[in-house]
Image (cartoon, grey):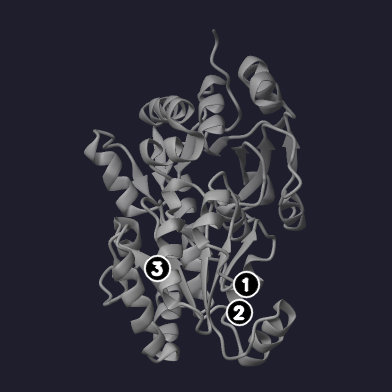
Amino acid sequence: MRKQEQVKICYVVSTLRECGPTNQLLNILKYLDEDSYAPSIITLSPEPSNTMIQEFQKIGCPVKSLNLSRIKGFLFGKKKLRTLFQTIKPQLIHTQGVRADRIAQKANLTLPHVMTIRNFPKEDMPSKFGLIKGTTLSYLHLLAIKRGRNVVTCSQKLCEKFYKIGYSHLTFVQNGVDVNKFTPQNATEKEGLREKLGIEETARVFIAIGSLIPRKNMETIIEAFKRFGKIGVKLFILGDGFLKERLLSNAENNRNVIFVGHTNNVLEYLKIGDFYISAALSEGLPNTVLEAMACKIPPILSNIPSHHEIFENEKWDYFFNSYDVESLYTLMCQILKQSREELAQKVHSIVEQKFTAQKMSLAYQERYRALSIPATIELKTK
């Protein structure tokens, strides 16, 4: 395909802050066929301190911003977005997140609009934003999803949840991992990083990553971990959130429970880990679990559909009911006695076969090709 035949795709997001959805967007763009597609990004708000904008600039993707606060976005976002669309002249719009999904719909385009949904709003938003705000955002997002024509969820199980409430028009593309970035640890690298972080060589390290909010259920992990007492097993919790003080109190100053907080060095901590734990109550298709597996870190997982989806048609004995502290503790004891290398090789193979960033990007490109792409932008008249 000649250069002039490239399809202009405009990705619209709130910001490029470092998080799972932004990493997945980067994964899509890294493997986009540059002969067929010319991508650009529009952000709605100013970039935060933990922006990933440089990662997108490194791969040659231009980024423009409306630079609007949430309130100004509500008041002026539609008009400013339409103006910017007129300048960029995209032929296809791809959004993710409630703000981007809704504002792109309000911009009133006749262009094909792909929406990626990475959570189930009724479960995620009240947990993250509180009951009143979360319920309101959930309602608004569900309304946008219902109106969308090309809505893609990030997992099969998430798609099935929407089917159950009557949203039968959705499809799914499973999340993928950048296996060139998240690579298996080697003994020398692991030893060096542990020395840097002050972790004794003989310690067994569990990693848990996620926002400190009810949906991530870190309390169950801490309660199970406290049963180890003072033996050489450590738990590193990466992430921040409004439950931090309560979780610190629950940990009872246990020196083997380390709260790292938000960090830009997630990969570094995965490299020093032996096992991963997620006690989440709900997920789309968890990036951190897949990233841990790509690093050859076997996971212990709560018994929710999206976790089982990762191991579909595979035997995996390390699932527990989300609030079952004793069951989690038992599995932690069991996995410490197993051949870690055998488990590590199995989970790494699953990622390589099913969940790479390249596979995900190619699946999205198949959906792009199935759409009727106009030659130029056309805005509906009022």
Percent coordinates x, y for residue 187 in the rendering: 62, 91
- The residue that label 1 is drawn on is 269
Q: Is residue 273 left or right of residue 198?
A: left
- Seen at 48% across and 27% down, the residue is 133
Q: Earlier in the sequence, mark 3 or mark 2?
A: 3
Q: Residue at x 58, y 65 (%)?
A: 253
Q: How far apart, in angstroms, are the residues tagged by discs 3 and 2?
A: 21 Å
Q: Disc 2, disc 1: CB below 8 Å?
A: yes
Rendering coords of residue 188 (x, y %)? 67, 91
Element type where label 3 sits in the image: helix
| In front: label 3 or label 2 | 3
Query: 292 or 192, which lies in front?
Result: 192
Callout 2: SS: helix
What residue does disc 2 label? 272
Label 1 CA crowd tier, 10 Å (few <14, some 14–19, many 20+): many
The C terminus appears in which quarter of the rendering?
Answer: top right
Image coords of residue 305 (percent x, y): 29, 56
Pointer 3 residue: 224
Q: Name the amino acid, label 3.
A: Ala
Query: Is 133 placed above or below 305 here?
Result: above
